[in-house]
């Protein structure tokens, strides 16, 4: 058997593992694994650097299957290459409850899956972040320690999604030359040929974004190999258009959208076996091909020992720092630094916007930690994400720690996911809270993948004033709180902001969204407490001496108003307690007893937040008073807007009085 | 004064109205209006077709300020051109509460504002939709009646946003030759020069997408005019890169990011007056310039009378149909058709997925109405949005009524907004519910602008099965219900689906999101009722004879489970009523009495929805039982997933029993 023959049959092994697993599951997408099997075979047998016995090797090449519906391609590869936790049973169990082999690749289900994909275009964005992380770490620790490629297999759908434009213009601008995208250029989408909905000249488009481009026959393994070799030498990121036939090998369905997302069916599958000369039963791989793949898995790992030697030869402190960062552990100095900072704040309370408070906290953090990488989607001066001591990353200098992401929220968020997944860095970056809507597709994946990505979301209510309803979030807090595993923090002053930052950094398995004001806020935490009170999610900020008539629950900028209302109510002999609610999700994690204590049993419960009510019933009950928004906002100076929408201490007092007198009348 | 001189001074009038209004408001974005004033002057004095005395003229050219932060450009134009509802007082009242002159242009605030912009890139997407609507209507009613351009002024930010890629590839593919984008190519973003974050060759990028491109000095009015003239003749959409100086005229701040988004300040503004030779006080326009602008306003309208004659000469029925469509009124036949369809369904109840039920309803609707334009983001066969009788729109044939949007959710939604804003068409289109996240930026604007845009969102829960957590919405329903003025419908069977479609079509001032299943549902509405029960938002679907022990509130696919639970509880002598909740928002619009009646006073309230609890407390109280999701989903056959996550009749029964026995013990 010629070498080419064997390589072809290695690709067929992928094809049949995929087609057979999908047939058994009666569900899945055979088109891509069968079409891109040659690409994957070349990449994994000739180029990729990894070790199936040490999947977490820090300097491995990263592989991203951006076209995640082709998940069986990745599962087949992992199995064939000898990843122990991807057995043939796992393959046969494709798409069943509890299986590692989910419908789309899920990060954390099995080693070798570098990211969760499926929502199209996200993988390209993740890869940008991985390639950025690689350059940052290579600059810091040297190319002896960090020097790997990031490969992507993307489909037509990935390239049509707008997020891909944000990703590729970023990659081109930042000259991410070690990012190589293999485009499964099969000319088919679900609705038919690409020409049904698109006429883009993709190579020209990528060139316009500063990419190196190439085009090859995606079933000619030698041509693919030559293109990858050339790409590795480019000083730009590379797109290789690999012309493929979707569902390659299927006698009738190949080249049609009919094979994209449905099992082949018994007859077509039998026909494919015949056409490709594959005689083995489902899930049975010929011994020579199995061996060839295992050898490829061994070969891919051959440089790891040398790498380990270089790592061991590093200065002990540097090595420990690198390993700590790759583990995702925080250094020991952070707690002390933040505690000292909280003491300072208590000694000299400051009236600042929480976006400014965030910058102040970040100044402490960025000095204590060297792995935080900041940024903003072109709102640096507004998001206050850049601390003085962090220099910007530029295309030719990755020694900085701040990224000007441009006006690309979605690409930024997807790249931050990639950075966190890569490891060694903790990404945080800013935009306006309302524009969380532009990157929600990626934020959801931060939460699903349990990645520590920190979103700094300023201008968090009508409090931003004149920019008006397009820029004023009213539903955004609720919509973010709705995402499972997303920690949404809305601190009320400088101290709470520092505490929330601390919590966000320590939430190793959750992304965080910090909701911060544009407008100044009076400090409410004026006494030093060593405990991080925000860690409880909600806590009594200001209690009454005796049983409370009223509980005032509020967050962020509305705490100030709650405190005013408390005072005004006291003047009328109505006893009110104020509960600060910086984080719904952390409150839910507290004990029942603590929750009960915080919720209290006042006659009247009031929720105050310059946003919609959704979610607040948890604190105030369905019969509680809610002082907030029930419509979009308006343009005007912010104090006038608070008046207009009735979010004032006066409004609280009068509603509380009405409620109390009604209650009395009813008694 | 030479002609060129006068044209320059006409542009200065815009510059000073903008700079002075922003100075007075102490807030706003002078950079764009000052930089793009020449472009706007050329466009509005030499090309745009409109009538300030008849702003709703159906065949007017559409103008979209995609860079909405430059709102003062548009307000200045409207005022100068003689739109009566844009007075100098309105200009002077810029960014104040209640003013028409909001921070960003708000559709509905003043005539001549064709769309709400501010969130970057949306305007380009809207313009694509307007240009599509124009071609559709021109094809149907003839170029004598519909024949206008759609112009866009876009900034660097618009072009960086991913949504712009989706928009321009759509425009290029569909050959929207009457769409002309004037790019305010000033090389400045908030964070500095464009080179800080981007290196894209925009002309090459647009060319790759099938656009005609040109580049001119954006302060040379003759060159701009020549470029627009050439663009009008192109058979492709055109991008004109207009090289401008941001904040043109300001002696120190022009050409810097410092003038993008802040008032000039007294000194710089005085300097600008000096530099541009402008001696008038703020808000005072020299008489000759004022006259010149008014004459331009009159000239722009000169073709309207002839157009009216052509319209009047149409066949009476065709004319009436055109006018009805442009008003947005539905034709009379719809109610009868839907009623007949409901009778059919009652006579022969069908077990189908609600996505299929949607297609069935649409088949009736698309026959009764000729203005519905369907589509899908490359999921036609899954969303069931294409009815047999509607042909696809192709680049060379706009007689169809179905658009293959490609894998471009955000661009699709923004274009649908543009179609609705244009008038004459009712856009509906599909994707998976979870990918609402990809287009949320545009969906929010549908709601804010009160546009009848119908989102068909299928595969609406873990019920989609094997595709797994990336494709399974759990938080999406809550996040959409959070948007003010967004009607979220989740019908439970064929009949409810028909009713919800009816409501979506009749909601003239609200977008709708139809949440539909992949899996089959047993019909629960088996008797014909002429009333649209879904119009109440929630209603008692199945009552008990006597006082209920339990109220089971559910929506969509979980109604079936609630009905099963009711039966199982009855077998244990526990009386349960089932309340169908197809639309939270419409329920809130009902009378207090009706709401009380529906909520009832059972001992135990249960909410059942294969999604998160957020929002359901309204129905079940904070102490109600919720049977749904509290995490992301999983990959597997859907029935196994319902078991896994405990969303079953058995689970409901056992929780109800536990609650009832606990309540008894407490008595």
Image: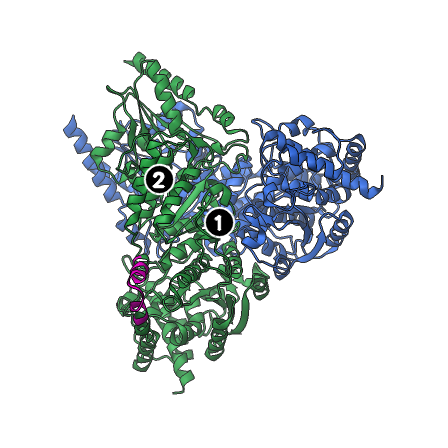
Chain colours: A green, B blue
Residue A176 spot, x, y in % from top left: 48, 63
The answer for how far apart the CA atoms under marks 2 and 1 are is 25 Å
Residue A400 spot, x, y in % from top left: 45, 55
Of A537 and A250, nearer the camera is: A537
Q: Is residue A619 left or right of residue A133?
A: left
Task: Give the main secondary structure of the magenta stretch.
Answer: helix
Which quadrant is the C terminus of chain B positioned in? Answer: top left
Of B179 and B359, nearer the camera is: B179
Q: Is residue B93 above or below residue A365?
A: above
Instruction: Reply yes or no: does residue A310 show up in magenta.
Output: yes
Q: Looking at the image, is mark 2 or mark 1 earlier in the sequence? A: 1
Give the residue number, with chain letter if any, for mark 2: A498
Q: Is residue A84 above or below residue A4?
A: above
Q: Chain of mark 1?
A: A
Give the residue number, with chain letter if any, for mark 1: A409
Q: Chain of mark 2?
A: A
| Residue ranking furthest to the right | B1
Q: Quadrant of residue A359?
A: top left
Of B572 and B398, nearer the camera is: B398
Q: Which residues are magenta?
A: A309-324
Residue B367 is at least partly visible in this image: no
Which quadrant is the N terminus of chain B positioned in? Answer: top right
Q: Is residue A402 above or below residue A553?
A: below
Residue B343 spot, x, y in % from top left: 46, 40
- In the picture, the disc for residue B298 is none
Instruction: Reply yes or no: does residue B481 show up in magenta.
Output: no
Q: Quadrant of residue B348?
A: top left
Q: Is residue A55 left or right of residue B16?
A: left
Binning the other alpha carbons within 10 Å of mark 1 as few (below 14), some (14 to 19) or many (20 upward) gives: many
């Amino acid at each position: 058997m010629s070498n080419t023959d064997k390589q072809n049959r290695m690709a067929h092994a992928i094809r049949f593992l995929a087609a057979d697993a999908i047939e058994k599951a009666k569900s899945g997408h055979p088109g891509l694994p069968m079409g891109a099997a040659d690409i994957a075979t070349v990449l994994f047998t000739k180029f990729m650097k990894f070790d199936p016995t040490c999947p977490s090797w820090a300097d491995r090449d990263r592989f991203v299957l951006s076209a995640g519906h082709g998940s069986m391609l990745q599962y087949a590869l992992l199995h064939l290459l000898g990843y122990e936790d991807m057995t043939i049973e796992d393959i046969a169990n494709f798409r069943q409850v509890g299986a590692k082999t989910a419908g789309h690749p899920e990060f954390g289900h099995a080693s070798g899956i570098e990211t969760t994909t499926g929502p199209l275009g996200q993988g390209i964005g993740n890869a940008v972040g991985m390639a950025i992380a690689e350059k940052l770490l290579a600059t810091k620790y040297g190319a002896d320690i960090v020097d790997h490629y990031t490969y992507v297999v993307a489909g037509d759908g990935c390239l049509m999604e707008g997020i891909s434009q944000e990703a590729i213009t970023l990659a081109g601008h930042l000259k991410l030359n070690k990012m190589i995208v293999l485009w499964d250029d099969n000319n088919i989408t679900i609705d038919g040929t690409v020409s049904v909905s698109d006429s883009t000249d993709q190579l020209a488009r990528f060139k316009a974004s500063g990419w190196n481009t190439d085009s090859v026959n995606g079933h000619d393994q030698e041509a693919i190999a030559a293109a990858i070799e050339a790409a590795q030498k480019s000083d730009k990121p590379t797109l290789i258009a690999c012309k493929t036939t979707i569902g390659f090998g299927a006698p009738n369905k190949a080249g049609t959208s009919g094979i994209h997302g449905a099992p082949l069916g018994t007859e077509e599958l039998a026909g494919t076996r015949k056409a490709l000369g594959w005689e083995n039963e489902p899930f049975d791989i010929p011994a020579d091909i199995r061996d060839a793949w295992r050898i490829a898995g061994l070969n891919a790992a051959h440089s790891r020992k040398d790498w380990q030697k270089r790592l061991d030869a590093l200065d002990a402190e540097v090595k420990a720092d690198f390993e700590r960062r790759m583990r995702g552990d925080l250094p020991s100095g952070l707690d002390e630094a933040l505690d000292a900072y909280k003491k300072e704040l208590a000694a000299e309370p400051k009236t600042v916007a929480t976006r400014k408070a965030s910058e102040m906290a970040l100044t402490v953090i960025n000095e204590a930690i060297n792995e935080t990488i900041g940024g903003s989607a072109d709102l640096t001066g507004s998001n206050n994400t850049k601390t003085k001591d962090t220099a910007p990353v530029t295309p030719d200098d990755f020694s900085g720690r701040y990224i000007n992401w441009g006006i690309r929220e979605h690409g930024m968020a997807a790249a931050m996911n990639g950075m966190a997944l890569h490891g060694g860095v903790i990404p945080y970056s800013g935009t306006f809270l309302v524009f969380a809507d532009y990157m929600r597709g990626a934020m959801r994946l931060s939460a699903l993948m349990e990645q520590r990505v920190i979103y700094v979301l300023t201008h968090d209510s009508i409090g931003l004033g004149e920019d008006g309803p397009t820029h004023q979030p009213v539903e955004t807090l609720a919509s973010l709180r709705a995402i499972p595993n997303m920690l949404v923090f809305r601190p009320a002053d400088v101290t709470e902001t520092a505490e929330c930052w601390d919590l966000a950094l320590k939430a190793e398995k959750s992304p965080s969204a910090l909701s911060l004001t544009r407008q100044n806020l009076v400090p409410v935490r004026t006494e030093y407490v060593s405990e991080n009170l925000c860690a409880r999610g909600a806590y009594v900020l200001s209690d009454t001496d005796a049983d409370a008539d009223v509980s005032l629950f509020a967050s962020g900028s509305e705490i100030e108003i709650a405190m005013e209302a408390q005072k005004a109510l006291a003047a009328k002999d109505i006893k009110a307690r104020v509960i600060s609610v910086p984080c719904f999700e952390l409150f839910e994690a507290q004990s029942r007893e603590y929750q009960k204590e915080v919720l209290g049993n006042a006659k009247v419960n009031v929720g105050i937040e310059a946003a919609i009510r959704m979610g607040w019933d948890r604190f105030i009950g369905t019969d509680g008073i809610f002082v907030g928004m029930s419509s979009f906002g308006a343009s005007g100076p912010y104090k006038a807007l608070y008046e207009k929408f009735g979010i004032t201490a006066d409004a609280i007092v009068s509603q509380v009085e009405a409620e109390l007198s009604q209650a009395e009348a009813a008694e």
